[in-house]
Amino acid sequence: MQLLQLNMPEVFSPTVDLDDEDSIFRVETAGCSIDQLTNLLDSHNIRVDLLERFDVA
């Protein structure tokens, strides 16, 4: 989460659901692409698998 705060200030409300067996990591963002986010995490050897995303109007 600190990595995101330092490198991607447009990402807010990052959470990790430790009660879920898959440790789901969720973020909210305005203006950050999925590619930007995954490239940053990948460059720090953090592996993520994307789930379907839901846009709330």
Image (cartoon, rainbow, N blue to C red):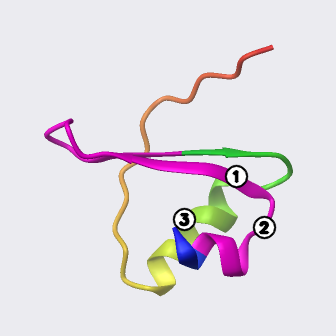
Q: Which residue is mark 1?
A: 12
Q: Is residue 17 magenta?
A: yes
- Location of the C terminus by quadrant is top right
Q: Outermost residue, bottom direction?
A: 44
Q: SS class of the residue under badge 3?
A: helix
Q: Position of residue 39 (x, y in %)?
A: 57, 73
Q: Which residue is mark 2?
A: 9
- Residue 13 x, y percent position in the rendering: 62, 47
Instruction: Name which residue type carries label 2.
Output: Pro
Check if residue 31 falls in the magenta segment: no
Q: Hey, what amino acid is under mark 3?
A: Thr
Q: Residue at x 64, y 53 (%)?
A: 34
State the residue in front, 27 or 43.
27
- Mark 1 secondary-structure assignment: strand
Residue 38's tag is 3
Residue 56 placement: quadrant: top right
> From the viewer's perspective, is the residue at label 1 or at label 3 nearer?
1
Residue appearing at x 70%, y 52% in the figure: 12
Which stretch appears magenta?
Answer: 4-26
Quadrant of the image occupied by residue 9: bottom right
Q: Is residue 33 above or below residue 1?
A: above
- At x 62%, y 70%, the residue is 4
* Percent of width and height locating residue 2: 55, 76
